[in-house]
Image (spheres, rainbow, N blue to C red):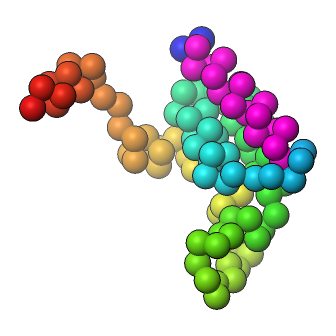
Amino acid sequence: MLSSHYLLVSTIDVLDASAAAGRFNTAMIRAAGEACVVLGFSELAERVGRILALVPKEAFFAGALPNFTPDSEAIQRCRRLRDLDVVAREFPPFRRSDVEAMSRR
């Protein structure tokens, strides 16, 4: 768990530096934040939340959907990390034995 914390701190440091330079990788920001949520690193999740608050609204859907202008509610949802139960449903835990069995197929 310690190495997970270290890797997330390092990732968030890079995301902070990028945000300070006006560069935002919203997919990476959200992925790092949700990893923090799942692993219970609330102080790191708060840091990610602060980065999400800095993202210009145009960056959330930049180039993804032409002729689409998100409303303020969609932008607010993009700025929030999902709750643990939602993330956990999307990324359920797995056992090493399950992975090994699947790799033998």
Classify the position of the N terminus by image quarter: top right
Out of 85 and 91, give the one closest to the viewer.
91
Asked whether, in this view, residue 84 is left or right of residue 57, the answer is: left
List x then y, in percent, for residue 82: 57, 50
Residue 80 seen in render: no
List x then y, in percent, for residue 39: 54, 27
List x then y, in percent, for residue 57: 77, 68
Residue 61 to residue 67: above or below: above
List x then y, in percent, for residue 22: 87, 53
Extreme residue in the left direction: 105
Asked whether, in this view, residue 3 is left or right of residue 75, the answer is: left
Residue 45 seen in render: yes
Q: Residue at x 35, y 37 (%)?
A: 92
Q: Residue at x 35, y 31 (%)?
A: 93
> Magenta segment, which residues?
3-19
Give the image quarter of residue 89: top left
Residue 4 to residue 2: above or below: below
How many marks can you see?
0
Extreme residue in the top direction: 2
Asked whether, in this view, residue 3 is left or right of residue 89, the answer is: right
Magenta stretch encompasses residue 9: yes
Classify the position of the C terminus by image quarter: top left
Secondary structure of the magenta portion, mostly? Answer: helix
Q: Residue at x 76, y 40 (%)?
A: 15
Q: Residue at x 85, y 38 (%)?
A: 17
Out of 27 and 94, give the one closest to the viewer.
27
Give the image quarter of residue 76: bottom right
Give the image quarter of residue 53: bottom right
Asked whether, in this view, residue 101 is left or right of residue 40, the answer is: left
Residue 40 to residue 37: above or below: above
Magenta stretch encompasses residue 98: no
